[in-house]
């Protein structure tokens, strides 16, 4: 009887410890999708199997160490084989593994079934930001880290969501199956949100797929999980899940904004207008490599300040931004920025930080290159 | 099952027990002066060179780890910039894997394989010299990349393309050359070990009479020969992509970045076992010596080692569960990976059965060996968890993985090397290592290593990706604990250096058979082992009748 009580107390205690660990962020989150709950279940099952095996194995080990000390007069036996025991401890682990493989296989098959999705989002990894494109909706945008430099450098107190805050999160409807298509424009990234139990590599030249169906509205945070260069630690993933009607309203608003942003291609822009817009684009897109003051990080990321080769060759400058430079980290922006943004950022680069060329590049010039 | 025991008994019938009698004649044609160590072809001297090199690299790689832990002590960027942080993680990994652990085991093999099989030297002594001297050149070149424009390798020790090709710093070509040299060194070393074990065993020593250390090294050497050329191939493809305009791994040119990962891990997973199989051998030699009882299940240990080696070629893509493999491939690699738990479990059970009903003492080598069994098993458990592909999506590329592979590599492989050093120092130097300092070193290391790596499990489960120089606030406590543990563990190793130096200089004189429970052949030659041993091989043939 006494033993049963002790055992019951031990199990209650361990279960309490598990809940406690979860509450304090010591364990894998249960998450907000059916898949994430299955994954958490598998995780806890294999964990407890390991704990039990470990408890048995280490008990025997420490019993032997304690009981058969020479200092207590232990005399060594001379056995060195026992076929039955050896077969037993080969077969038992095998059976445990088979028992574990069955639910794992079922969950994996479920995770691999991305068919019949209600919504598709193209997720593109860039050094070092994510780009989300709602397939068939003409809505697409970059999602940039917004944690201020001062917080990273320690001159300002850090927010609760330090390094996990972005300007524009990925917005998704709840209770809908969302198919996520992953790719990359440069190196390999990996899109990961622990609460969704989705982690999939974004690989240049490949389109990977994953899916999720979020149960509860909320904001879910994750990070790039595959080393992707200098700012790998600074490209968070933020998902904002909301009810379908809210999502529809948001999507409609984004479509209008996108249309408005792309407008003005035909009119003539003034230098101050282009400089203002260009500074914004530069700050969110270009500054991570070419640095906030345009000084670059040679030899990988060339300086823009006083770069004579660049400043003397306007055509080359436009070509570099629009089409990228093969064989270098410089990506093509023709697919991710509109003509106004590209014109503005090139104008900005040619006139900021003492690069006083006075060149004004009109969006119409860029548009001609984007759609020949 | 072949009886392993009678070796000692047979040895006593042999006419050439010590083999140290003819030593004097040979010292005459041994070079002296400054070139002695450069030109030596003696397996003991080359073994010593390997071990000194390994220790040096361990300290350099460790210093880099301390830079990492210092930066991660608190959230925010305090000490280094992300560019340099990435160089530190990359160099730390490369140096520890290729500069510390592998040469450490090769050094032990150089010293102990000939002594344990009754051979006078390695089969190919000049090749042995060349294999060693490639290494300092390779690693000087590798370290020098840190001073080149754009810095050294910054793409992780797994150097995934295209981060390591199109997007890599200009120094990458030198990195490739350094890896080629280290790889050639490993291949030549492996050929030498195989040639030695298969050809130079003492008369009468059958394969199934060899110690587990020799057995595991034989199997490891075959793994090295099989996979180091794959590494050479993959880095050559990188070289061509970087310098000659090919597109093996460049998607824009029709190449395939995932191909890189398949090739890398086809090398990389057997590589993982290259770093742990000799450790199994060491533990299988030390545990029986201090339990004063023959190793339980000698034959099953050999078969388990061979099974692990074969399985190691069939599990590589478990490092790639999130790259988007087809379902059938995910399932295949999940099952094969889980299967590895079986032979690995057999090994742990055998060690514990060896302890059971032994007569156990706890000298420093034994302490490290016991800590190995417990902590390696913990690393094995997290490995089993990682094998479950659906759960691996959550674990992959987080600190949980960092915790896992450091558990199998530090209190695993590194502790086994330390156990081996404490165990064989009396044979190498003729003195026992200072037992009191040894115990201090052990306890500080074991406390430090757990404080360092155990909280990483929690940080990873809570969602912290690996290879980041700065992190969100919820990971702060785990990282602070890890950093404190890191410094404790790191500085404890200076004690180890001191113990070794002290032991070389003097200490309690060790007899030929330094440990009363040790039964293998090396304990039949004097301590310290003379420069030339077993010039006439010991005759282990069974006495008729």
Image (cartoon, rainbow, N blue to C red):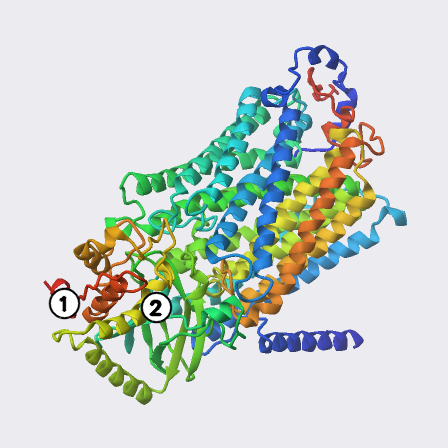
Residue projecting furthest to the bottom: A245
Given residues A25 and B499, the one toward you in this image is B499
User: At 69% from the left edge and 76% from the top edge, which residue is drawn?
Assistant: A13
According to the picture, the residue beneath numbered tag 2 turns out to be A283
Q: Tell me, yes or no, if residue B455 can be seen here.
A: yes
* Same subunit: marks 2 and 1: yes
- Image quadrant assignment for residue B506: top right
Q: Residue at x 27, y 41 (%)?
A: B245
Mark 2 or 1, nearer chain start: 2
Query: Residue B365, position in %: x, y?
Result: 75, 42
Q: Chain of mark 2?
A: A
Q: Is residue A253 above or below residue B224?
A: below
What is the crowding at mark 2: few (fewer than 14 residues within 10 Å), some, or many (at least 20)?
some
Image quarter hosting the N terminus of chain B:
top right
Q: Who is closer to the viewer here, A274 or B146?
A: A274
**Residue B299: image x %, image y %?**
63, 39
Rendered position, B532 above or below A99: above
Above or below: residue A261 compared with residue B178: below
Residue at the disc numbered 1: A367
């Amino acid at each position: 009887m006494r033993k049963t009580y002790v055992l019951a107390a031990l199990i209650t205690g361990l279960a309490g410890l598990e809940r406690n660990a979860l509450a304090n962020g010591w364990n894998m989150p249960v998450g907000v999708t059916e898949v994430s709950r299955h994954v958490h279940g598998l995780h806890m099952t294999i964990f407890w199997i390991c704990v039990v095996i470990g408890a048995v194995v280490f008990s025997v080990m420490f019993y032997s160490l304690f009981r058969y000390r020479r200092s207590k007069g232990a005399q060594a036996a001379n056995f060195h084989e026992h076929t039955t025991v050896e077969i037993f401890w080969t077969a038992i682990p095998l059976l445990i593994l088979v028992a574990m493989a069955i639910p794992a296989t079922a969950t994996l098959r479920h995770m691999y079934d991305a068919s019949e999705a209600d919504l598709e989002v193209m997720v593109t990894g860039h050094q070092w930001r994510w780009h989300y494109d709602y397939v068939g909706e003409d809505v697409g945008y970059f999602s940039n880290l917004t944690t201020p430099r001062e917080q990273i450098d320690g001159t300002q107190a850090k927010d609760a969501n330090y390094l996990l805050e972005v300007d524009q999160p990925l917005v998704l409807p709840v209770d809908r199956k969302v198919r996520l298509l992953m790719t990359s424009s440069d190196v390999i990234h990996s899109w990961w949100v622990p609460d969704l139990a989705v982690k999939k590599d974004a690989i240049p030249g490949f389109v990977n797929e994953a899916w999720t169906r979020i149960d509860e509205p909320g904001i879910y945070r994750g990070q790039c999980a595959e080393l992707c260069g200098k700012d790998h630690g600074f490209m968070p993933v933020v998902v904002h899940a909301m009810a379908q009607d809210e999502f529809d309203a948001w999507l409609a608003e984004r479509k209008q904004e996108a249309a408005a942003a792309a407008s003005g291609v035909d009119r003539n822009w003034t230098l101050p207008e282009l400089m203002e817009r260009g500074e914004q684009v530069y700050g969110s897109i270009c500054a991570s490599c070419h640095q906030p003051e345009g000084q670059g990080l040679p030899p990988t990321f060339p300086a823009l300040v006083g770069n004579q080769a660049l400043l003397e060759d306007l055509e080359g400058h436009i070509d570099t931004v629009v089409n990228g430079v093969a064989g270098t980290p410089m990506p093509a922006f023709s697919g991710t920025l509109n003509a106004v943004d590209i014109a503005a950022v090139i104008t900005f680069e040619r006139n900021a930080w003492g690069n006083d060329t006075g060149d004004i590049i009109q969006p119409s010039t860029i548009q001609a290159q984007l759609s020949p | 099952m072949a009886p392993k025991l009678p070796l000692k008994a047979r040895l006593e019938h042999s006419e050439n027990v010590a083999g140290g009698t003819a030593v004097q004649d040979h010292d005459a044609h041994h070079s002296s002066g400054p070139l002695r160590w450069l030109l030596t072809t003696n397996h003991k001297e080359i073994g010593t060179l390997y071990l000194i090199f390994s220790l040096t690299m361990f300290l350099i790689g460790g210093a880099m780890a301390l830079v990492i832990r210092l930066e991660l002590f608190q959230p925010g960027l305090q000490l280094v910039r992300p560019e340099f942080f990435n160089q530190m993680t990359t160099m730390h990994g490369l140096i520890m894997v290729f500069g510390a652990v592998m040469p450490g085991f090769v050094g032990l093999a150089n010293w102990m394989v000939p002594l344990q099989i009754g051979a006078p030297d390695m089969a190919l002594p000049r090749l042995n010299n060349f294999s060693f001297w490639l290494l300092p050149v390779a690693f000087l070149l590798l370290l020098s990349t840190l001073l080149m424009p754009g810095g050294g390798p910054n793409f992780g020790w797994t150097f995934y393309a295209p981060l390591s090709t199109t997007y890599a710093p200009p120094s990458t070509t030198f990195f490739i050359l350094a890896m080629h040299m280290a790889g050639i060194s490993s291949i030549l070393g492996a050929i030498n070990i195989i040639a030695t074990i298969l050809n130079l065993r003492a008369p009468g020593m059958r394969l199934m009479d060899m110690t587990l250390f020799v057995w595991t090294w034989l199997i490891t050497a075959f793994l090295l020969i099989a996979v180091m050329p794959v590494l050479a191939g993959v880095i050559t493809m990188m070289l061509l992509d970087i310098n000659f305009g090919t597109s093996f791994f460049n998607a824009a040119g029709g190449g395939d970045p995932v191909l890189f990962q398949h090739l890398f891990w086809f090398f990389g997973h057997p590589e993982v076992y290259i770093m742990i199989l000799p450790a199994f051998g060491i533990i299988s030699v030390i545990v029986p010596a201090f339990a004063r009882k023959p190793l339980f299940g000698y034959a099953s240990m050999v078969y388990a080692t061979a099974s692990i080696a074969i399985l190691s070629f069939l599990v590589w893509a478990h490092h790639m569960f999130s790259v988007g493999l087809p379902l059938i491939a995910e399932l295949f690699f999940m099952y094969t990976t889980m299967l590895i738990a079986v032979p690995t479990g057999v090994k742990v059970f055998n060690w514990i059965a060896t302890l059971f009903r032994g007569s156990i003492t706890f000298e420093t080598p034994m302490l490290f060996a016991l800590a190995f069994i417990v902590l390696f098993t913990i690393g094995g458990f997290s490995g089993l968890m990682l094998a479950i592909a659906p759960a691996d999506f959550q674990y992959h590329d987080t600190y949980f993985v960092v915790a896992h592979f450091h558990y199998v590599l530090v209190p695993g492989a590194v502790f086994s090397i330390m156990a081996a050093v404490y165990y064989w120092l009396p044979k190498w130097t003729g003195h026992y290592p200072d037992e009191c300092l040894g115990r201090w070193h052990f306890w500080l290391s074991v406390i430090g290593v757990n404080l360092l790596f155990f909280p990483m499990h929690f940080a990873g489960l809570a969602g912290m990706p690996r290879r980041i120089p700065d992190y969100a606030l919820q990971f702060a406590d785990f990282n602070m604990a890890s950093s404190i543990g890191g410094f404790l563990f790191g500085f404890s190793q200076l004690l180890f250096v001191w113990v070794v130096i002290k032991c070389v200089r003097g200490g309690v004189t060790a007899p030929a058979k330094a440990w009363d429970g040790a039964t293998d052949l090396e304990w039949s030659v004097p301590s310290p082992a003379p420069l030339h041993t077993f010039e006439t091989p010991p005759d282990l043939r069974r006495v008729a009748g």
